[in-house]
């Protein structure tokens, strides 16, 4: 379904889109980098409003969110399109092309959310949610008018302009933001984007909502201990309680590098923990992903893949009363 763009400026001979930092120039029938925004009959439009490609009920830990509504499920939905072109994309079938879709109106979506047992709310994920901005904004606003206790989650690459971000944040309860690396070269070469807007998104979002960060450690690209330490230092300067998820890469899409060495990830985790209170490992079986109190070491949440056993309720360690950055 088509919908008029929210962030653009008419420049006379073309339309300038201001949703993300590509700031694409659009003209009749010509699309931006995301392949979603164009001009039709002199009206700037987006072509994926309400169009679903994917919908599943997932454990919220799969987003991954370890410190937000642990043990809950969440309805996870996505559309198509992206404003990055990551060589390793896990969901390239929907992010880099246009698969079959099904339109779902907002009332039906809310009905799905409220009828799922043990459900925290809705996560916009699988492809880049900011490329679904017009729909997500309308959905989020209506959900919060219906029931403020329904959680709204974005799993995002963070490559968005400041104004759209700040307008939607009042409706967002949690974000997992991909910080894909920590060099300009990596973002330019591997992701087709730039790092500065992502860093700004993390700084802004962390002031308004719960934020967790994921870095996919790609073998021989961004998996050095030095780069992960730089990420940890950056996050610690914002808030040392921001959880960092270090995820193991496997060959996918255009990227043919061998899987990341587990010992590299574990060494990076050990060094990152010198700066951050919570560092976790993804895509590696058998690792300790429990949550421990950063003050006394008390085991707050025991995790076995996506099943959890919490020994805490609220945001205080039951052993030493230290503040814990966690939302139940």
Image (cartoon, grey):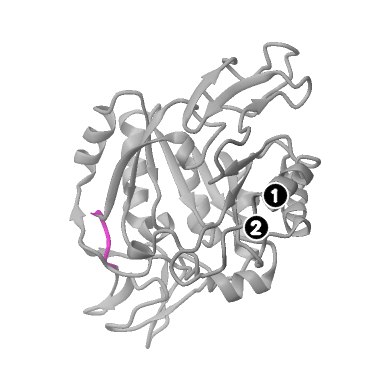
> What range is drawn magenta here?
46-51
Front residue (pair 283, 129): 283
Task: Name the residue located 28 percent from the left edge and 51 percent from the top edge.
Answer: 54
Q: Is label 2 in a helix, a strand or a loop?
A: helix
Q: Is residue 90 magenta?
A: no
Q: Quadrant of the N terminus?
A: bottom left
Residue extending farthest bottom: 13
Q: Which percent across, then down, holds residue 26?
A: 37, 80
Pick whichever of labels 2 and 1 is earlier in the sequence.
2
In this view, which residue lies farthest toward the right? 274
Secondary structure predominantly adopted by residues drawn in magenta: loop
Residue drawn at x 45%, y 77% as measured from the top left: 24
Mark 1 lies on a secondary structure that is helix
- Could you say which disc has been placed on residue 199 in the image? 2
Q: Is residue 284 left or right of residue 229?
A: left
Picture residue at 20% right of the left edge, 48% below the top: 104
Give the label on residue 263, or none: 1
Residue 111 in percent (x, y) is at 22, 33
Quarter where residue 144 is shown: top left
**Residue 47: within the magenta?**
yes
Q: Nearer the viewer, residue 99 or 48?
A: 99
Task: Work out whether 110 lies above or below 98.
Answer: above
Question: Residue reaching furthest top?
Answer: 319
């Amino acid at each position: 379904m088509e919908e008029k763009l929210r962030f653009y400026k008419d420049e006379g001979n073309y339309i300038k889109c201001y949703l993300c930092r590509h700031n694409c120039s659009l003209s009749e029938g010509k699309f931006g980098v995301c392949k979603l925004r164009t001009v039709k009959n002199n009206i700037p439009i987006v072509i994926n409003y309400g169009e679903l490609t994917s919908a599943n009920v997932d454990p919220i830990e799969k987003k991954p969110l370890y410190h937000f509504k642990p043990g809950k499920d969440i309805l996870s939905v996505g559309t198509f399109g992206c404003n990055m072109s990551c060589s390793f994309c896990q969901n390239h079938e929907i992010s880099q092309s246009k698969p079959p879709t099904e339109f779902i109106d907002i009332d039906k979506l809310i009905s799905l959310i409220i009828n799922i047992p043990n459900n925290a709310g809705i996560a916009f994920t699988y492809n880049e949610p900011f490329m679904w901005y017009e729909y997500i904004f309308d959905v989020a606003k209506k959900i919060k008018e219906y029931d403020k206790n329904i959680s709204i989650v974005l799993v995002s690459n963070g490559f968005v302009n400041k104004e759209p971000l700040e307008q939607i944040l009042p409706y967002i309860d949690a974000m997992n933001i991909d910080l894909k690396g920590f060099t300009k070269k990596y973002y330019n070469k591997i992701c087709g984007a730039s790092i500065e807007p992502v860093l700004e998104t993390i700084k802004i979002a962390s002031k308004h909502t719960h934020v967790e960060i994921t870095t996919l450690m790609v073998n021989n690209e961004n998996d050095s201990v030095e780069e992960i330490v730089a990420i940890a230092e950056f996050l610690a300067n914002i808030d040392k309680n921001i959880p960092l998820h270090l995820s193991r890469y496997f060959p996918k899409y255009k990227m043919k590098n061998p899987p990341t060495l587990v010992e590299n990830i574990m060494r990076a985790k050990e060094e990152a923990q010198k700066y951050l209170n919570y560092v976790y490992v993804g895509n590696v079986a058998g690792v300790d992903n429990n949550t421990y109190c950063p003050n006394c070491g008390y085991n707050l949440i025991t995790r076995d893949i996506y099943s959890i056993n919490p020994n805490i309720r609220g945001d205080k360690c039951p052993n030493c009363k230290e503040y814990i950055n966690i939302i139940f």
